[in-house]
Image: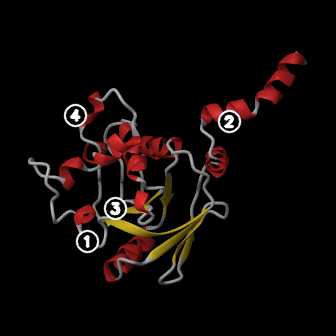
């Protein structure tokens, strides 16, 4: 979903697992879909972890636990906090579609697979890379208090654990930052530059 990014303050859903690959984020059978409907992919985010073979919620998975069962579309938990090496495996963009479709606007981890990281950015999900120490502290904070919040200041490129007050800076490509701040995809950006492109062509 195209939304302008500014300062996001939200509770989080913790997923303290390392090496979560794209097949776990969105199982391969859903790649056959002929739709890019956000709800379809969001409904199937972590499908095999969230539901059993009878399509009943698995009580032990964090998304189904009482403190975290509300989806971000309900105004909470806009941030997913994930373990190291998030989004490894295949390059399927469907994984980013599923994360965005569920309603997450930010994913925080200490390391992202490069292709998945770019897929998130292209689908208006901000991947925030933090130190392993900051990530561990954030997991501990959420475990102690599921209502704990983080603040992600996109213009300043700073993420803050509001419980402890600890902050870290994060990197983001300048072009992608501009696009997120202005809710522009690559085509939107080119259209925004139309007058400049036409002026350049006219002067050739």
Q: Nearer the N terminus, badge 3 or badge 2?
A: 3
* Mark linked to residue 189: 2
| Dot 4 crowding, Cα within 10 Å, few <14, some 14–19, many 20+ | few
Q: Quadrant of residue 2?
A: top right
Asked which secondary structure carries label 2, the reply is helix
Lower position in the chain sequence, tag 1 or tag 2 = 1
The residues tagged by marks 4 and 2 sit, at their Cα atoms, a distance apart of 33 Å
**77, 157: nearer the viewer:** 77
* Badge nearest the viewer, 3 or 2: 2
Q: Nearer the viewer, residue 148 or 90?
A: 148
Q: Residues within 10 Å of mark 3 (few under 14, many from 20)?
A: many
Q: Secondary structure at mark 1?
A: loop
- Distance between mark 1 and mark 2 Cα atoms: 41 Å
The residue that label 1 is drawn on is 66
Q: Residue furthest right?
A: 203
Q: Which residue is mark 4?
A: 29
First in sequence: mark 1 or mark 3? 1
Q: Secondary structure at mark 3?
A: loop
Nearer mark to the viewer, of 1 and 3: 1
Assess disc 2: are there few (<14), some (14-19) or many (≥20) residues with their C-alpha within 10 Å of its C-alpha: some
Secondary structure, mark 4, is helix
Of label 4 and label 2, which has the lower sequence position?
4
Q: CA distance from mark 4 to mark 1?
A: 29 Å
Q: Which residue sits at x=59%, y=53%?
A: 172
Query: Of the numbered discs in the image, which one, if any, rests on residue 83?
Result: 3
């Amino acid at each position: 979903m195209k939304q302008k990014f500014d300062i996001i303050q939200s509770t989080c859903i913790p997923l303290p697992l390392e090496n979560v690959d794209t097949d776990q984020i969105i199982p391969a059978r859903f790649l056959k879909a002929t739709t890019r409907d956000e709800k379809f992919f969001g409904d199937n985010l972590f499908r095999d972890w969230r539901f059993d073979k009878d399509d009943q919620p698995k009580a032990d998975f964090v998304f189904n636990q009482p403190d975290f069962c509300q989806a971000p579309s309900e105004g909470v938990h806009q941030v997913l906090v994930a373990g190291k090496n998030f989004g490894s495996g295949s390059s399927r963009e469907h994984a980013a579609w599923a994360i965005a479709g569920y309603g997450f606007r930010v994913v925080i981890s200490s390391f992202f697979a490069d292709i998945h990281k770019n897929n998130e950015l292209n689908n208006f999900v901000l991947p925030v890379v933090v130190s392993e120490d900051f990530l561990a502290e954030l997991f501990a904070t959420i475990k102690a208090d599921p209502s704990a919040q983080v603040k992600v200041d996109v213009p300043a490129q700073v993420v803050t654990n509001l419980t402890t007050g600890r902050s870290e800076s994060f990197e983001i490509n300048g072009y992608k930052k501009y696009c997120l701040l202005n809710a522009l995809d690559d085509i939107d950006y080119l259209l925004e530059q139309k007058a400049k492109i036409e002026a350049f062509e006219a002067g050739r």
